[in-house]
Image (cartoon, helix red, strand yellow):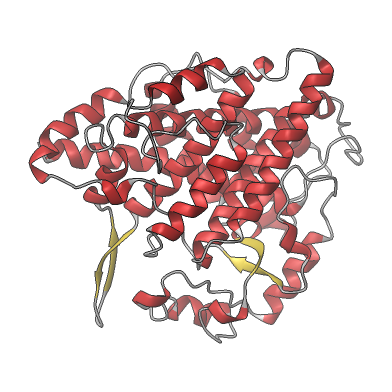
Amino acid sequence: MEQEGTSEIKTNPAKWSDTATSLSLEVTGYLDDCTCDVETIDAFNNYKLFPRLNELLQSDYFRYYKDEVPDGIRAGSYKYSEEANNLAEQCEEAKRLGAVDDSLSKETRQAVLQWAQHDDSSDSFCEADDIHSPDAEYVDLLLNPERYTGYKGPDAWKIWNSIYEENCFKPQNVKRPLASGRGDDGGHTFYKWLKGVCVEKRAFYRLISGLHASINIHLSARYLLQDSWSEKKWGPNVTEFQQRFDEVLTSGEGPRRLKNLYFLYLIELRALSKVLPFFERPTFQLYTGNQSQDAEMKQLLLEILHLAKSFPLHFDENSFFAGNKEEAAKLKEEFRLHFKNISKIMDCVGCFKCRLWGKLQTQGLGTALKILFSENLIEKIPESGPSYGFQLTRQEIVALFNAFGRVSTSVKELENFRNILQNMR
């Protein structure tokens, strides 16, 4: 989905050399409300965590996510995963780039349903309501990569505007920069308001902004560069990236969006470091029925979680909900309801591949917050037996790691765009 406000921006190639410098220099240093800096995250993610996480997400356990896929927008009548994999590119015509390929073999469908029987269950912080629908099916995420679909303009703007306006604790008269109906104060009123709210509400806005930025990096990095009868070519589109993030072209908003992406990274990384006891239990399995592969993937998962725990400059979540217990409980419930509402808003997305990834990443972020809010329960998890106080369903686990995988990919893609822009100087 398109970053709102980009329809007003004109790309000026003559500015590329200047923006390459400004982008590289501006998105550096320490992040607000954190003790961490951009450079530490870049080095940790790009050279240590990203390669391992990418390998994990290719495995069978993490590639299937349950979502409701309406009949009219499925990508074809293919019956078997192998055939669908071979023909996936053919069915992505320009007018159907947003269609979802939900083709799984009968055997795969039955296997995934059996995996779900090994889940723990609990009240969800952000569970997509439609996963219990009889029309909800498991979708192969590897057959449906997140990339440019052509879904942008007024429809995409309405979705993001609803998310920000209805869920970011913001009064209606405070307009966000580059939003419709904004004032001419360059965002002064908005940022004055944002600075004045509690750290929890400020963090909520920054998480949504970071999620928005991450999605737009994916679409810019995997853009349809060539679409002909003989070939479809996907790759980085520098112009699209600049329209969303260049300091000059976005009136200073681009670097703020990117810093919010790094803030989102820290929050989700912190959640992974905290949830380690849940996955360390000998009885926990990444169950697919393939014992050797399941054991191998669990070992890789634990390596990733230990690596996350070793990060030297974690976000200190103790600043969240540290005041009056009654007020803190009320605010936590507001957070939960806002995330459920965002998931419902995602149902209105007209591009169903965008909808799939939007809901997955929203649920993944909601699961990360559920973990951070449940630290005391996680600490009490016994080494063996059920984790009665704290549970994660398979759906939440898949969403959590795939959502963080998307953010991790965004940080990696930022390095690629920096290199491209610097080479254009």
Image x and y of residue 307, in percent: 57, 30
Task: Name above or below for residue 216 compared with residue 265.
Answer: below
Image x and y of residue 353, in percent: 51, 65
Q: Is residue 333 left or right of residue 33?
A: right
Q: How many marks?
A: 0
Q: Residue at x 33, y 25 (%)?
A: 185
Q: Is residue 419 left or right of residue 76?
A: left
Q: Residue at x 62, y 75 (%)?
A: 70
Image x and y of residue 124, in percent: 78, 45
Task: Name above or below for residue 283 compared with residue 321.
Answer: below
Task: Name above or below for residue 229 compared with residue 424.
Answer: below
Q: Is residue 400 left or right of residue 49?
A: right
Residue nearest the observer in this picture, 397 or 76: 76
Image x and y of residue 385, in percent: 92, 40
Q: Residue at x 86, y 31 (%)?
A: 381
Q: Is residue 156 visible?
A: yes
